[in-house]
Structure formats: structure tokens, C-alpha cells
Amino acid sequence: MAFNTIDPNDIEVGKPTKKSLFQTIKDNEDDHEARISNLTLGASKIDVFIGELSNLQQYSPNNNDLVRIGLFRASRDFTLTNAQIYVLHGGPNQDVAPTAGVFEIDIKKGTSLSSLNTVFNVKPAVSTFNEEDTNATVSFIPGGEDVSQGDWLQLDITSLQTGQTRVFIDIFGEPV
């Protein structure tokens, strides 16, 4: 559907109104609302966590978990829809890949920091070692995870790959 200009002859004073005039107005309104809706969907992502984590081995030399890497408080209602993990190589030349294991994250949600519980059925995990490889699966409750204004979200790393020093994590949602 596209915007249609109204013919000036259809709106002259004293002329009878035609069905086609009302149809054009309706079509233009439908087109206008569809465009607004499309813009809203595309531009309204909510970034919960997006960024690179470096020096992971420094903070967890025995590949133990890293708790509360990120903390987010919801400023409005939304649905958590996506979590992706990208392997980044480390070392002085940025070409040293992890050698074994699984990198896994967890996102916990709660109305207070003392009531946090995981939002995943299966936690997103990467078990490959290629630069920028992303094979993390996201298994929310079907349709995503609803987050209410004021809820807390906590990002935890539950396991590291051997030799892993860097990772990029992207977690976002969409308004409801």
C-alpha cells in the first residue's frame, strides 16, 4: 500500500462526496499506521547488555563462574527476545583461540536482587572456537521472557572455554 494524493476535484466546495474519496482517505490512514508500526518495531529494541568482555582468565583463572558481570533494571515493560554470544580471540596478536570447553551465560530475573531466577530453559552456550562464531541457542519460554518495569536482570557467566580471554555478548528485548 502507498500514500495516494487526493484529487483536488474530489474536494471542491459544492460537489457531492464520492465513495472513492473516503476510500482514498481510509487507504492513506491504513498506510500511515502501517508505516508507524514498522518504524516502531525496527527502532525500539531495548539493549539489556551489549559489549565485549575481556581478560576473562584474569578474573576466573580456574574457569569458575563469574557472577553479576552485568546488572540491568528495567525502565519499562518489555519482552526479552534475544541473547547471542560471539567468540573473540585473545592474546597479543588477537589470534589466540580457546582450545576446549564451553562458554555459557545465564540471565537471572527478579523483582529484587534477592529473588533472581534464570530465564532460560537451556542456557546459551558456545562450544566452537572460530573467531566471531556464534552458535549460542536461546531457549526462552515460547515467545520470549516478559520483563516488568522495575525488574532486575543479572548477567552471569557459568563456564569459560580453556584459554578464553574475550567474548562479545548481545542481549536485547522488544517493548510490549
Image (cartoon, rainbow, N blue to C red):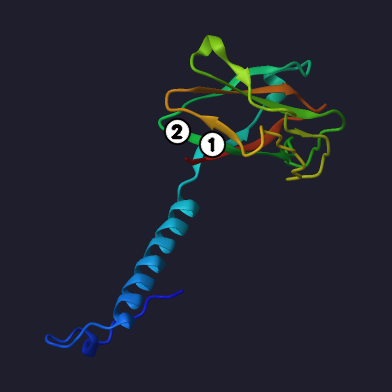
Q: Residue furthest bottom?
A: 9
Instruction: Give how far across and how far down residue 13 sits, in percent.
Output: 12, 85
Residue drawn at point x = 40 percent, y = 59 percent: 36
Residue drawn at point x = 83 percent, y = 39 percent: 128
State whether residue 71 is above or below residue 83: above
Residue drawn at point x = 80 percent, y = 28 percent: 161
In this picture, residue 68 sits left or right of residue 103: left
State whether residue 151 is above or below residue 52: above
Q: On the image, which quarter does residue 7 sit in?
A: bottom left
State whether residue 143 is above or below residue 69: below
- The answer to whether residue 56 shows anywhere in this view is yes
Please tell me which residue lies in front, 143 or 90: 143
Instruction: Give neighbour class at mark 2: few <14, some 14-19, many 20+ (Cα, 10 Å).
Output: some
Please tell me which residue lies in front, 16 or 128: 16
Q: Residue furthest right?
A: 100
Pointer 2: what residue?
A: 77
The Cα atoms of the two marked residues, 1 and 2, are separated by 7 Å
Q: On the image, which quarter does residue 74 sit in?
A: top left
Please tell me which residue lies in front, 134 or 109: 109
Residue drawn at point x = 76 percent, y = 25 percent: 160
Instruction: Give how far across and how far down residue 26 sits, in percent.
Output: 35, 70
Q: Amino acid at mark 1?
A: Thr
Instruction: Give how far across and how far down residue 61 sits, in percent.
Output: 75, 17
Q: Amino acid at mark 2?
A: Asp
Q: On the image, which quarter does residue 39 sit in?
A: bottom left
Pointer 1: what residue?
A: 79
In this picture, residue 98 sits left or right of residue 6: right
